[in-house]
Amino acid sequence: MDRLGFHLRVKTPDRMQGGRFAFTDPVRNAEEARAALADLATKAKAGGQVLHSL
């Protein structure tokens, strides 16, 4: 994780796959990172796009 987001890799039965999750705004500390992660979760639950690249 960095100030702009994070990469996530998962292993499926067929292959490894990964993507980049970008925060809406850069984060500067743990409190902002927690809020940005919660924002991504809220967007994902609402059906919004949170995965920005594979």
Image (tube, rainbow, N blue to C red):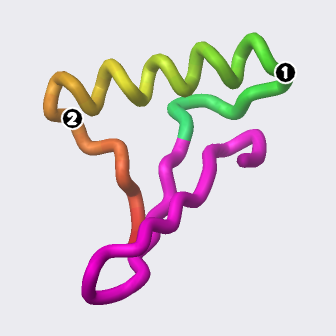
- Specify the farthest residue to the front: 13
Q: Callout 1: 10 Å neighbours few (<14), some, many (20+)? A: few
- Give me the residue at 21% from left, 35% from top: 48
Residue 36 relative to residue 48: left or right: right
Give the amino acid type for the residue marked by disc 2 in the picture: Gly
Is the Cβ of the residue at disc 2 closer than 8 Å to that at disc 1? no
Res 23 → quadrant: top right
- Percent position of residue 13, x then y: 27, 81
Q: Which residue is mark 1?
A: 29
Residue 25 spot, x, y in % from top left: 61, 29
Furthest residue toward left? 47
When the figure is inspected, residue 20 is found, relative to residue 43, above or below; the finding is: below
- Left or right: 14 with respect to 25? left
SS of the residue at dot 1? loop
Identified at 75% across, 11% down, the residue is 31
Residue that badge 2 annotates: 48
Q: Earlier in the sequence, mark 2 or mark 1?
A: 1
Instruction: Say which quarter of the image contains residue 28.
Output: top right
- x and y percentages locating residue 43 in the rendered image: 29, 26
Front-most of residues 25 and 21 = 21
Q: Residues within 10 Å of mark 2 (few under 14, many from 20)?
A: few
Q: Secondary structure at mark 2?
A: loop
Magenta-drawn segment: 1-22
| Cα–Cα gap, marks 2 and 1 | 25 Å
Q: Quadrant of the C terminus?
A: bottom left
> Which residue is located at x 41 percent, y 73 percent?
11
Relative to 17, does residue 45 appear above or below in the rendering? Answer: above
Q: Vertical placement of 50 versus 40: above or below? A: below
